Image (cartoon, grey):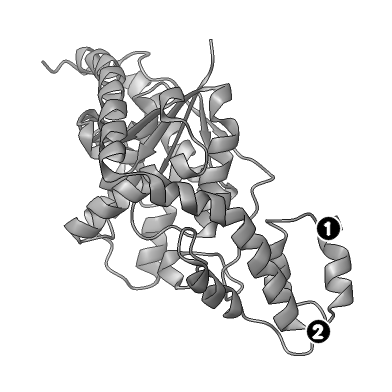
Amino acid sequence: MKKTYLTGLQPSGDLHIGNYFGALKPFADAYEQYDSVLMIADYHALTSLKDATELQKQVMNIARAYIAAGVDPDKCIMFQQSRVSQHTELAWILDCVIPVPYLMQGHAYKDKVAKGLEANAGLFTYPMLMAADILLYDADLVPVGEDQRQHVEYAREAAKKFNVAFGDTLKEPQELIDKNVALVPGTDGGKMSKSYGNTVPLFAPREELQKAVMSIVTGSGDERPENVYAMHKLVKSEEELAPLYEENKGKYKALKDALLEDLDALIAPMRERYNAISDTEILEIIEKGSEKARERAETKMEQVRKAVGVR
């Protein structure tokens, strides 16, 4: 039997190339090897996004993006988190077995507090909803970046504590860290993130792509603009890039133009597929996948309810 492989993406804003190289492409490359479950994590997005219309739009866009990136929805379970009520049900039960000090170590929560920002209760208990996402499907493998390893550790700890308290019910998942998935740099050289305003859009028209590429920060006097090169390495190998950067030492405009052409060559076919998929098709795919997810999640919740003594 194939191992269960689960991943998800928050519909919290317009997608950028960091999402493609960090989430869309790795899933598209690997999902057919596994029993794959793909979640559009709209409940998670509520910790930061407070616009109902925007949230609904982005849910559609996430599903459309995975299909444009090459994912066949008939070969995996692609679903919307909020359409599967068992996620929040299990999250509450896990909240009741995990101690508060453990949750206080959550990276996202600690970062907010350290910056003096208000951390809502959803952000505080976020790890247990993520644990529920994983444990409901008996996930064997959860692909994450090195900076997200803690999420799977939380799920594993929640499963252990539940099983000690109520009997062996929840499978302990393992993180799958792809060393080939590099940190995608933003236009300012830091990690690409919507919240930092340093993104290169994924499905926007070429004119917007060009504007973002031309805004990449370059250091004065550098023969090779490192921020441009770091992004370019995502599209072409260092061997392919070597003669280009050798011939254009210090010519930032020429190198940005070359990056733009290579990015657009990669994105254009996906952009065409993305724009060709109708909302009606997307809604049918989401509902079909969510029905499959509910069936699997309910099977696990029946075991959980019996173990804890409810219903």
* Residue 272 in view in this figure: yes
**Residue 61 in the image, given as x and y percentages of width and height:** 35, 50
269 or 108: nearer the eye? 269
Residue at 39%, 31% in the rendered image? 134
Residue at 54%, 22% in the rendered image? 34
The kind of residue tagged 1 is Glu
- For the residues labelled 1 and 2, the Cα–Cα distance comes to 18 Å
Number of other residues with Cα within 10 Å of mark 2, as a class: few under 14, some 14 to 19, many 20 or more: some
SS label for mark 2: loop
Q: Quadrant of residue 93?
A: top left
- State the residue position of label 2: 250
Q: Quadrant of residue 96?
A: top left
Q: Residue furthest bottom?
A: 220
- State the residue position of label 1: 240
N-terminal label among 1 and 2 = 1
Is the residue 57 above or below the residue 86 in the image? below
SS label for mark 1: helix
Residue at 86%, 64% in the rendered image? 242
